[in-house]
Image (cartoon, grey):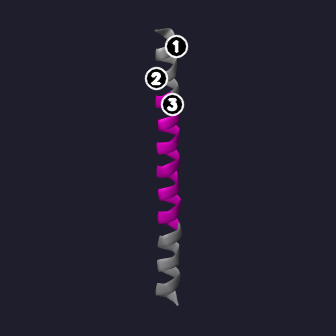
Amino acid sequence: MSSLLGAVTLASTVCGLMLGQITAGAQSAGVVIASLVLMTLRA
């Protein structure tokens, strides 16, 4: 039973890290796209 709880905790932690990385990647991609748009508008 304790091993099951540990496995669930580990899985939720891994999923949380993956989701965090995905959101961070989306934010950085949004910043890059916004800067590209600003550069094209200035040019």
The type of residue carrying mark 3 is: Thr
Q: Secondary structure at mark 3?
A: helix
Q: Which residues are magenta?
A: 11-31
State the separation of the CA atoms marked 2 and 3.
8 Å
Please check the rendered image and state whether residue 25 is part of the magenta-colored stretch, yes or no: yes
Q: Secondary structure at mark 2?
A: helix
Q: Earlier in the sequence, mark 3 or mark 1?
A: 1
Q: Nearer the viewer, residue 18 or 23?
A: 18
Q: Secondary structure at mark 1?
A: helix
Residue named by callout 2: 8
Please check the rendered image and state whether residue 19 is part of the magenta-colored stretch, yes or no: yes
| Residue located at (53% from left, 82% from top) | 39
Residue 1 in the image: above or below residue 19: above
Residue named by callout 3: 13
Residue named by callout 1: 3
* Residue 38 coordinates in the image, percent (x, y): 48, 79
The type of residue carrying mark 2 is: Val
Decide: few, some or many residues near mark 1? Use Cα within 10 Å; few <14, some 14-19, many ≥20: few
Residue 26's disc number:
none
State the separation of the CA atoms marked 1 and 2.
9 Å
